[in-house]
Image (cartoon, rainbow, N blue to C red):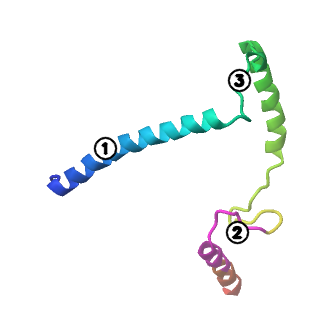
Amino acid sequence: MGKSIHSKWKIKMRNIKRVRYGQKELARLKNMVASNKDVEMMDPQLVTVTDAKKIKEDAAKKQDSMDVDQQSTSTRDPHTMKDEHGQYPVWMGKRKIKNLKNKKKNKKNVW
C-alpha cells in the first residue's frame, strides 16, 4: 500500500516535534545539572585504574561464588510442574494449572 498524503504529513510533523522536543529536553537537563549544588562533578581522585588481570580475577571469584548458588536451585516434576514445596512456577497461568489438575484428576478416576 502506498503512503497517503495524510500519513506523510503526520510523519513530517512527528519529525519536527522530535527535533523541537529534543532541544527542549537537552536545555532542561543542562539547567538541572547546573542548578543542582548537591551533585559535584567527578573528582579525579575518586577514579581508580585497574588492569585486565585484576578484572579477570575478580570475575573468576564471582563466577565461583555464583556456582554455589546455582546448585541450590529447586527441581520441578516434569508432569505436575510442581517443585518440592508443592508450588507451581510463577510464570504459569491459572488456566494451565487448572488443566493440569483436571488431567491428574481424570487419570485417577480411570479404571
Point out residue 50 in the picture as x, y percentages from the top left corner: 75, 14
Lateral position of residue 55 relative to residue 16, left or right: right
Of the residues under marks 1 and 3, which one precedes in the sequence? Answer: 1
Instruction: Provide the residue designation for mark 2.
Output: 80
SS class, disc 1? helix
Report crowding for label 3: few under 14, some 14 to 19, many 20 or more residues within 10 A (C-alpha): few
On-image quarter of the N terminus: bottom left
- Earlier-in-chain disc, 2 versus 3: 3
Quick one: label 1, few (<14), some, or many (20+) residues within 10 Å?
few
**Disc marking residue 42:** 3
**Percent x, y for residue 99?**
61, 77
- State yes or no: residue 39 in magenta: no
Which span of residues is magenta-colored?
87-101
Tell me the kind of residue under disc 2: Thr
**Mark 2 Cα-neighbour bin, 10 Å: few <14, some 14–19, many ≥20:** some
Q: Quadrant of residue 100?
A: bottom right
Q: N-terminal of the two: label 2 or label 1?
A: 1
> Would you place residue 30 above or below residue 107 in this image?
above
Q: Distance between the residues labelled 2 and 3?
A: 55 Å
- In this rendering, the label closer to the viewer, 2 or 3: 3
Which disc is residue 16 wearing? Answer: 1
Pick the front one: 102 or 64: 64
**Residue 105 visible in the shown view:** yes
Tags 2 and 3 in contact by the CB under 8 Å rule? Answer: no
Query: Is residue 89 within the magenta segment?
Result: yes
Residue at horizontal 78 percent and vertical 20 percent from the top: 46
Residue at image x 79%, y 43%? 70
Residue 111 seen from this side: no
